[in-house]
Image: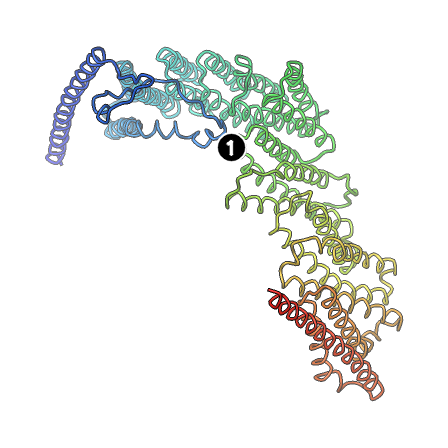
């Protein structure tokens, strides 16, 4: 074992020596290369002074070889501003990836070094080489050495030095944590004090070095410090006093150095801490800290606005987030502690934004700033109204916030808000789905004025507002945007449809099943009808319009087939009044309007199959409704329905189909639409097959004679119409041929 340990030691020493030699060799080559580059730059500068750039005079022409004797000049110009500002948003991660590309090895290296020091200390502890106090001392010494190395390299390698110094900071934080948690060398107060000193030192160093990277390390360590030295006791008052001081320091750094990353890191950590406090221990103190935090981060978001009177994209995003996150916590605490009024928070925040809106209005500015403050103000007042009616907090706030993000996106055309909307809108839909589950357990909810439906109403209004905002989509549409537009439109109308349907079904849930089904299908028919009626104003595209027409006629068919017979049966059993049957017949109103007014002006009839789909719905509706009337006028006993149905199918249904077939043939002749004629002949074919294959063997003699006579007359009339059509077509063809011959003779 001892021999193996010595062999391992010698191997490590040899590897270290080789690494130092290789490093020294490459370092010498790099220095030589740097000297050569400096010499080349000096020579180029001297050449430029004695050979000014070639300038072409007006009215002269260069010879063919003039370019060969001219030194190309690359002037240093001002950066060209992007004429379309919003396109820059596509590359907002470029600086991050650029930094990682150049510093990835440094980051991995410092992380590996910290781990190596940690494993070395652990190994030394396992072997009992050093005591607890010495272990902590080694940790502090290692951190100080790493930070000193960063300090030594700061002038020539600023980014590298910042990462090195940050690694040293991490070593110090971990050392404090271990000394406090594992060895109990420090008391909680002493550990917290040392942590604060380290954080303050790092912040001062980051400002001294003018290093934003080091500032990120410092702030992250400062916010993680309470977790490192936590004893499990909930001293939230002390914790958030510390966080407030840290946030005030952040605010000062942002105004002095304009390091936006500091504000975002602080906002994320503070929001998580506050949310945990409000959820675990809701108390009035948390509300005070929410307000203080709101003021700090509101000032952070307005930094550029106060200095330069403009809002950058991430400033606008921070304004949206801070206004809505500052509502969630206090309102939740107020509702938990049963304090009133909860709407005071959105109203106060709305008034603050209203003041900034008035400032923009008084300055006669109606640009991005005006739109942002207007959108936030209206959204906050909307939240106040929603909370006053006791809607669900998360669902309402997310739905309104999603609409606000969409509004800002449309006003600024900045893609960051589009991405945020893409994320938040599905979350709002999911929250609404969770809210709808309360219908299952809820009892005796009032009509409309109940928390579930009022929340749905907020979602419906905001979703409809989203559809209006997205009506005028981008002029240049690719496949992805069209796909998203279709998906978004379907989901939006689906949310509106389900929200109203669930409220309706909840209040009729005690009725017979046929009433529930008939009401649901009738509601679905009218909902689809309204969209089709206003499809132009709603800018429904052709694909969705076609799908809606198919859905509408399918709903009509299903409503007639299932609801009609069930309602007649329940009426004969005295379970339903005749008034409900008249309600069931209301589907004819949208059906007739669509057939007469909407359908002829649509693109739906350009599809040949659409004629068959519409005709099927029309034939089914006429047949079923005549059957229902036949049953109603023939009996009051439900037991007679079955024999009446057989008699109607044998005697009257073929006659009805024959008449309808004749109407289709006449429609085809009049409109010169071949599909109607095909449908008429197909219906006659179905009727003949039904008659000869089934019905004729079930009729009595009198009925059989009547059926054959009527059918024969109808077939003769149909044949006469067909012959007339053939004659008309023949005359048209002959007339065209005569005109053609006359023209040829004249020529």
Q: Furthest residue to the front?
A: 746
Q: Indicate left or right for 114 with 663 as reference.
A: left
Position in image of residue 323 (x %, y %): 60, 24
- Circle 1: element type: helix
When asked about the image quadrant of residue 662, the answer is bottom right
The crowding category of the residue bearing disc 1, from other C-alpha atoms within 10 Å (few below 14, some 14 to 19, many at least 20), is some
Q: Indicate left or right for 282 with 592 as reference.
A: left
Taking depth in this image into account, of 241 and 656 the one nearest to the observer is 656
For the point 74% across and 46% down, the residue is: 503
For the point 23% across and 23% down, the residue is: 66
Position in image of residue 612 (x %, y %): 67, 65
Q: Quadrant of the C terminus?
A: bottom right
Position in image of residue 366 (x %, y %): 63, 21
When asked about the image quadrant of residue 609, the answer is bottom right
Q: Furthest residue to the bottom?
A: 701
Q: Quadrant of the N terminus?
A: top left
Position in image of residue 554 (x %, y %): 68, 60
Judge whether 334 appears above or below 642 on screen. Answer: above
Judge whether 640 appears above or below 504 on screen. Answer: below
Q: Indicate left or right for 730 with 519 as reference.
A: left
Residue linked to disc 1: 415
Judge whether 127 appears above or below 459 on screen. Answer: above
Taking depth in this image into account, of 611 and 671 the one nearest to the observer is 671
Taking depth in this image into account, of 149 and 375 the one nearest to the observer is 375
Taking depth in this image into account, of 337 and 730 the one nearest to the observer is 730
């Amino acid at each position: 074992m001892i021999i193996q340990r010595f062999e391992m030691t010698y191997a490590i020493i040899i590897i270290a020596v080789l690494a130092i030699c290789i490093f020294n060799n490459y370092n010498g080559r790099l220095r030589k290369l740097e000297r050569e580059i400096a010499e080349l730059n000096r020579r180029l500068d001297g050449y430029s002074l004695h050979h000014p750039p070639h300038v072409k005079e007006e009215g002269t022409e260069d010879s063919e070889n003039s370019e060969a004797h001219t030194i190309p000049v690359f002037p240093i110009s001002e950066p060209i501003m992007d004429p379309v500002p919003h396109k820059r948003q596509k590359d907002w991660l470029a600086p991050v990836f650029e930094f990682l590309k150049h510093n990835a090895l440094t980051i991995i290296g410092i992380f590996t070094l910290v781990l190596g020091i940690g494993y070395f200390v652990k190994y030394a502890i396992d072997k009992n080489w050093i005591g607890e106090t010495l272990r902590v001392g080694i940790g502090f010494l290692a951190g100080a050495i790493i930070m000193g190395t960063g300090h030594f390299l700061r002038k020539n390698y600023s980014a590298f030095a910042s990462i090195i110094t940050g690694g040293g900071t991490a070593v110090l934080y971990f050392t404090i944590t271990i000394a406090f948690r594992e060895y109990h060398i420090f008391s909680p107060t002493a550990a917290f004090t040392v942590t604060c000193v380290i954080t303050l030192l790092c912040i001062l160093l980051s400002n001294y070095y003018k290093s934003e990277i080091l500032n990120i390390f410092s702030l992250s360590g400062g916010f993680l410090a309470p977790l490192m030295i936590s004893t499990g006791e909930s001293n939230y008052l002390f914790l958030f006093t510390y966080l407030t001081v840290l946030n005030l320091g952040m605010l000062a750094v942002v105004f002095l150095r304009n390091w936006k990353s500091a504000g975002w890191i602080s906002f994320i950590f503070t929001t998580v801490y506050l949310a945990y406090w409000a959820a675990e221990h809701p108390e009035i103190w948390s509300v005070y800290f929410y307000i203080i935090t709101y003021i700090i981060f509101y000032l952070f978001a307005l930094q550029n606005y106060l200095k330069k009177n403009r809002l950058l994209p991430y400033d606008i995003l921070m304004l949206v987030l801070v206004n809505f996150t500052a509502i969630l916590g206090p309102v939740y605490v107020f509702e938990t502690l049963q304090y009133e009024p909860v709407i005071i928070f959105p109203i106060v925040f709305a008034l603050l934004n209203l003041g900034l809106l008035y400032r923009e209005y008084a300055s006669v500015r109606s640009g991005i700033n005006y739109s942002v403050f207007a959108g936030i103000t209206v959204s906050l007042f909307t939240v106040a109204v929603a909370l006053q009616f006791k809607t669900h907090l998360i669902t309402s706030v997310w739905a309104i916030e999603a609409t606000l993000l969409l509004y800002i996106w449309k006003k600024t055309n900045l893609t960051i808000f589009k991405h945020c909307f893409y994320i938040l809108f599905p979350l709002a839909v999911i929250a609404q789905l969770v809210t709808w589950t309360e219908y299952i357990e809820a009892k005796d909810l009032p009509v409309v004025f109940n928390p579930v439906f009022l929340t749905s109403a907020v979602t419906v209004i905001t979703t409809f507002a989203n559809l209006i905002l997205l009506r005028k989509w981008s002029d240049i549409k690719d496949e992805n945007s069209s796909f998203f537009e279709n998906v978004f439109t379907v989901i939006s109308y689906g949310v509106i449809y389900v929200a109203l349907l669930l409220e309706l079904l909840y209040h009729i849930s005690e009725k017979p099943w046929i009433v529930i089904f008939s009401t649901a299908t009738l509601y679905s028919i009218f909902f689809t009808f309204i969209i089709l009626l206003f499809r132009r104003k709603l800018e429904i595209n052709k694909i969705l319009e076609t799908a809606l027409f198919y859905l509408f006629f399918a709903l009509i068919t299903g409503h007639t087939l299932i609801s009609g017979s069930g309602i007649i049966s329940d009426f004969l059993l005295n379970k339903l009044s005749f008034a409900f049957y008249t309600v069931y017949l209301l589907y004819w109103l949208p059906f007739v309007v669509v057939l007469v007014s909407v359908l002829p002006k649509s693109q739906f009839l350009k599809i040949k199959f659409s004629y068959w789909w519409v005709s099927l719905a029309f034939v089914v509706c006429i047949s079923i409704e005549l059957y229902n009337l036949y049953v109603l006028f023939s009996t009051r006993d439900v037991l007679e329905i079955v024999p009446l149905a057989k008699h109607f199918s044998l005697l009257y249904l073929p006659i009805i189909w024959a008449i309808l077939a004749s109407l289709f043939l006449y429609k085809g002749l009049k409109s010169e639409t071949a599909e109607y004629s095909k449908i008429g002949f197909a219906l006659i074919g179905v009727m003949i097959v039904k008659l000869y294959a089934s019905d004729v063997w079930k009729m009595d003699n009198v009925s059989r004679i009547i059926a054959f006579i009527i059918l024969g007359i109808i077939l003769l009339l149909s044949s006469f119409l067909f012959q007339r059509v053939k004659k008309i077509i023949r005359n048209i063809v002959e007339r065209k041929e005569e005109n053609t011959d006359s023209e040829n003779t004249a020529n």
